[in-house]
Image (spheres, grey):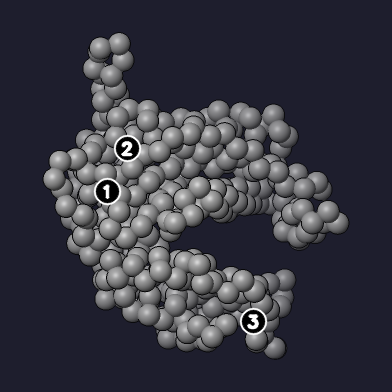
């Protein structure tokens, strides 16, 4: 991507060249990226006193439901294949979280195709219900990626607020609690005109809100620690169906050592992994990491402490996109950093 004369984003010459070979991959990645960013910023603007997490829905749902077919191979039959892309969680330590569903699409075609994609995206968010049937708010986001003009985002919203407030006298969820794999029935209770029917889908009822709060927090912890290099510290946060076995050993393609790099950027110490690769023939180094004290909390399984500390720091982020010895830097509210620089041959 690059900025045009009007400071709007469009495909760069390289992006237009790749268009011939990777249209589906490119539209999926760009659409997902912009959808997650837009959803996070929208929720953050509505709840400025909250922290906001964007959590992959498939990974979170696997802690409670089997998303594969009964034979163990392939996907489950429709409509259970249709799932949202993200849960967006607005949270404060010790308080019930607010939840929003997000489904994203991307296309290189016309706006008419975007409208078709948004209509099919509605089926993805309608497969998940938190609380009573049809009450969870959601965003449908379609990204239009023309070959020469600016990118455009199209949004549909079902407004509302779903809060993970446990029923009865259930105490505050302990996010340090290790989760066991559950095998819940993929059924949703629907009430219509005094009739009770069961339809396929994924439903979290109030008696399971505390459990689902733990699922979301620990799934986020897994994605954060995986960003620093993966391996055993990631495995502790995942159930079997979520892919725990894939992180039981410290192995990573083209990386000899993981989480062995430390860099000080804008006066903040980060721990993570260096990655060296070529971009159009130019050697590039990328560092993906997490602020050192936050990393230490998650490395040792202290999700409660991580969330408490990161929430206190949410308004203290440096705003600059470059740093000494780095060409581009992105530091996010969750404590992660991505820093990129050219390498001399």
The residue at 54%/42% (across/down) is: 104
The residue at 23%/38% (across/down) is: 206
Distance between mark 1 and mark 3 Cα atoms: 39 Å
Instruction: Tell me the quadrant of the picture where the C terminus can be found.
Output: bottom right
Relative to 193, residue 308 above or below: below
- From the viewer's perspective, tell me whether residue 156 is left or right of residue 149: left
Instruction: Tell me the quadrant of the picture where the N terminus can be found.
Output: bottom right
At mark 1, the secondary structure is: helix
Pick whichever, 69 or 59, lies toward us: 59
Distance between mark 2 and mark 3 Cα atoms: 42 Å
Query: Do the numbered discs 1 and 2 sit on residues whose CB atoms are within 8 Å?
Result: yes
- Residue at numbered disc 3: 323
The percent coordinates of residue 71 (x first, y second) are 26, 40
The percent coordinates of residue 165 (x first, y second) are 26, 44
The local crowd at label 3, few if under 14, some if 14 to 19, many if 20 or more residues have their Cα within 10 Å, is some
**Residue 250, quarter of the rendered image:** bottom left
Instruction: Decide which of tag 1 and tag 2 comes sooner along the chain.
Output: 2
How many marks do you count on the picture? 3
> In this rendering, does residue 252 appear at all?
no
At mark 2, the secondary structure is: strand
Residue most extreme to the front = 49
- Residue at numbered disc 1: 212
Relative to 33, residue 343 above or below: below
Name the disc covering residue 130, or none: 2
The residue at 72%/71% (across/down) is: 280
Instruction: Decide which of tag 1 and tag 3 comes sooner along the chain.
Output: 1
């Amino acid at each position: 991507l690059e900025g045009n004369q009007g400071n709007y984003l469009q495909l760069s010459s390289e992006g237009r060249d790749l268009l011939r070979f990777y249209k589906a991959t490119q539209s999926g990645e760009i659409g997902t990226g912009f959808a997650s960013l837009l959803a996070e910023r929208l929720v953050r603007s509505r709840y400025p006193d909250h922290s906001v997490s964007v959590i992959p829905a498939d990974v979170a749902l696997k802690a409670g439901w089997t998303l594969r077919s009964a034979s163990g191979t392939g996907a489950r039959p429709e409509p259970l294949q249709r799932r949202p892309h993200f849960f967006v969680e607005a949270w404060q330590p010790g308080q019930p979280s607010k939840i929003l569903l997000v489904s994203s699409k991307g296309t290189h075609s016309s706006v008419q195709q975007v409208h078709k994609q948004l209509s099919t995206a509605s089926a993805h968010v309608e497969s998940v219900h938190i609380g009573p049937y049809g009450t969870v708010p959601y965003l449908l986001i379609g990204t239009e990626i023309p070959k020469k003009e600016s990118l455009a985002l199209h949004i549909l919203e079902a407004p509302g607020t779903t809060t993970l407030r446990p029923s009865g006298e259930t105490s505050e969820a302990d996010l340090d609690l290790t989760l066991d794999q559950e095998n819940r029935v993929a059924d949703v209770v629907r009430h219509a005109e005094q009739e009770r029917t069961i339809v396929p889908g994924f439903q979290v009822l109030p008696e399971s809100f505390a459990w689902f709060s733990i699922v979301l927090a620990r799934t986020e912890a897994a994605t954060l620690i995986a960003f620093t290099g993966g391996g055993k510290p990631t495995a502790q946060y995942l159930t079997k169906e979520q892919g725990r076995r894939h992180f039981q050993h410290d192995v990573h393609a083209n990386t000899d050592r993981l989480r062995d790099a430390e860099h000080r950027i804008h006066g903040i110490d980060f721990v993570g992994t260096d990655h060296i690769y070529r971009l159009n023939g130019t050697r590039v180094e990328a560092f993906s990491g997490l602020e050192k004290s936050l990393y230490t909390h998650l490395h040792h399984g202290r999700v409660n402490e991580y969330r408490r500390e990161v929430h206190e720091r949410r308004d203290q982020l440096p705003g600059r996109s470059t740093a000494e010895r780095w060409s581009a830097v992105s530091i996010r509210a969750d404590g992660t950093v991505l820093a990129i620089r050219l390498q001399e041959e």
